[in-house]
C-alpha cells in the first residue's frame, strides 16, 4: 500500500508543479524586452533600356520593422528618359516571396500624384496611370510600403523582396 501512496503523491506533486509554472507564465506575461513581431521588405529597381533608373543595384528602401498601423518605409527612385521621344512609363512590382501579398501595400507617387497604390498582390499588374517623360526629362518617384491597421494575419516575421519594373511606350502625336 505504501507504493500506491508514493505514486499518487508523486503525481500530485508533478501536477502542482505544472500548475505553478502555468500560473506564473500567465501572470508574468512575455518578457519586457521581447521584440514584437514585424515584417521586412526590400524594394529594388530593374533597369529599362530607354530609361535611366537610379538607384540601380542598391535598394530603394529597406525595412525590418514593418507593423500594422505604422507609416511604413519610404524611398525615392529617379527615372530619366534617354530617348528623343516623349514616353509614357508604367510600373509594377515583381516578387519571389508572396508572404506579404495580402497584408502589405505599396504606393508610388510622381510629384504628389499617385501612380500606383494597391496591395502587393495587385501591384504585379502594370499601373493604369503612366508617368509622362519628355526627352531627357527626369522625375523622382516616391515609393512607400506599409501594412495597414487590421491587416490579415501572416505578416508576422514575413519577408518581401520586391523589384520595381518599368515599361515605356512612345507617345504619338494626335
Image (cartoon, rainbow, N blue to C red):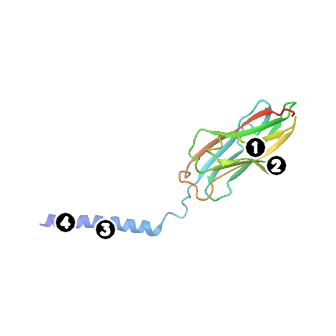
Q: How far apart are marks 3 and 1 (CA)?
A: 66 Å
Residue at 26 percent of width and 67 percent of height: 12
- N-terminal label among 4 and 1: 4
Tell me the residue that label 2 is attached to.
111
Tell me the residue that label 1 is attached to.
129
Q: Residues within 10 Å of mark 4 (few under 14, many from 20)?
A: few
Q: Disc 4 or disc 2, which is closer to the eye?
A: 2
Determine contact: label 4, label 3, CB under 8 Å. Answer: no
Determine contact: label 3, label 1, CB under 8 Å. Answer: no
Q: Disc 2 or disc 1, which is closer to the eye?
A: 1
Residue 100 location, x and y as percent? 58, 47
Badge 3 element: helix
Badge 1 element: loop
Badge 4 element: helix
Q: How many marks overall?
A: 4
Tell me the residue that label 4 is attached to.
6
Tell me the residue that label 3 is attached to.
16
Amino acid at each position: 500500500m505504501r507504493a500506491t501512496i508514493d505514486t499518487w503523491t508523486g503525481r500530485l506533486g508533478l501536477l502542482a508543479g505544472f500548475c505553478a509554472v502555468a500560473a506564473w507564465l500567465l501572470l508574468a506575461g512575455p518578457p519586457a524586452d521581447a521584440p514584437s513581431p514585424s515584417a521586412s521588405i526590400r524594394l529594388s529597381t530593374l533597369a529599362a533600356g530607354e530609361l535611366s533608373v537610379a538607384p540601380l543595384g542598391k535598394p530603394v528602401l529597406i525595412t525590418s520593422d514593418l507593423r500594422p498601423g505604422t507609416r511604413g518605409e519610404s524611398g525615392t527612385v529617379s527615372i530619366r528618359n534617354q530617348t528623343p521621344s516623349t514616353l509614357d512609363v508604367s510600373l509594377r512590382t515583381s516578387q519571389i516571396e508572396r508572404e506579404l501579398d495580402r497584408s502589405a501595400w505599396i504606393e508610388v507617387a510622381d510629384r504628389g500624384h499617385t501612380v500606383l497604390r494597391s496591395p502587393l498582390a495587385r501591384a504585379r499588374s502594370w499601373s493604369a496611370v503612366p508617368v509622362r517623360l519628355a526627352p531627357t526629362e527626369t522625375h523622382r518617384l516616391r515609393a512607400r510600403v506599409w501594412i495597414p491597421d487590421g491587416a490579415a494575419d501572416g505578416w508576422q516575421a514575413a519577408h518581401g523582396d520586391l523589384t520595381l519594373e518599368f515599361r515605356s511606350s512612345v507617345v504619338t502625336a494626335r
